[in-house]
Image (cartoon, rainbow, N blue to C red):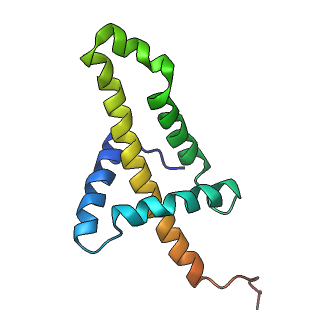
Amino acid sequence: MARLGRRAALTALWSAIRASHRGGPSLGQRLAALPRMVGATLSGRYDGKARVFGMVLALLYIVSPIDLVPEALFSVFGLVDDSFVVLWLAGAVLSETERFMVWERRRVQTIPGRARAR
């Protein structure tokens, strides 16, 4: 299972921005693939459970009221951890949706059935 670190998330974010300029999937296409990816993951067809779970945890961290305590105590410095989580989440979403879209294209090209031994 691939682990998406901070550097990989930023690289994915940058490559997603560049890819849309070179004819790759746009941000809108990637975000539109997000619900399909979650559905395929929950149904067990796609192998992204750990990554989707990490993204959900990051989103919950960003919106949780418990996270308001560091912002209240440390003002600007309390927002730094949120900015790292937001950057990671953006890169992870872009990277994983691209991976999902490639999986989707390959799946359409594959003919379902059983392989026979000759």
From the viewer's side, name the closer residue of 101 and 50.
Answer: 101
Task: Tell me residue 32's x, y (percent).
Answer: 47, 63
Residue drawn at point x = 25 percent, y = 53 percent: 14
- Identify the image quadrant of the C terminus: bottom right
Task: Tell me residue 46's x, y (percent).
Answer: 62, 61
Q: Quadrant of residue 7?
A: top left
Task: Tell me residue 38's x, y (percent).
Answer: 59, 55
Q: Is residue 105 visible?
A: yes
* Left-right relation of 19 to 91: left
Above or below for 112 versus 33: below
Task: Tell me residue 40's x, y (percent).
Answer: 64, 61
Q: Residue furthest bottom?
A: 118
Residue drawn at point x = 51 percent, y = 57 percent: 34
From the viewer's side, name the closer residue of 97 and 118.
Answer: 97
Instruction: Please count the marks in the image.
Output: 0
Residue drawn at point x = 47 percent, y = 44 percent: 3
Residue drawn at point x = 53 percent, y = 35 percent: 57
Q: Quadrant of residue 114?
A: bottom right
Q: Residue furthest top?
A: 73
Q: Is residue 5 visible?
A: no
Above or below for 80 versus 111: above
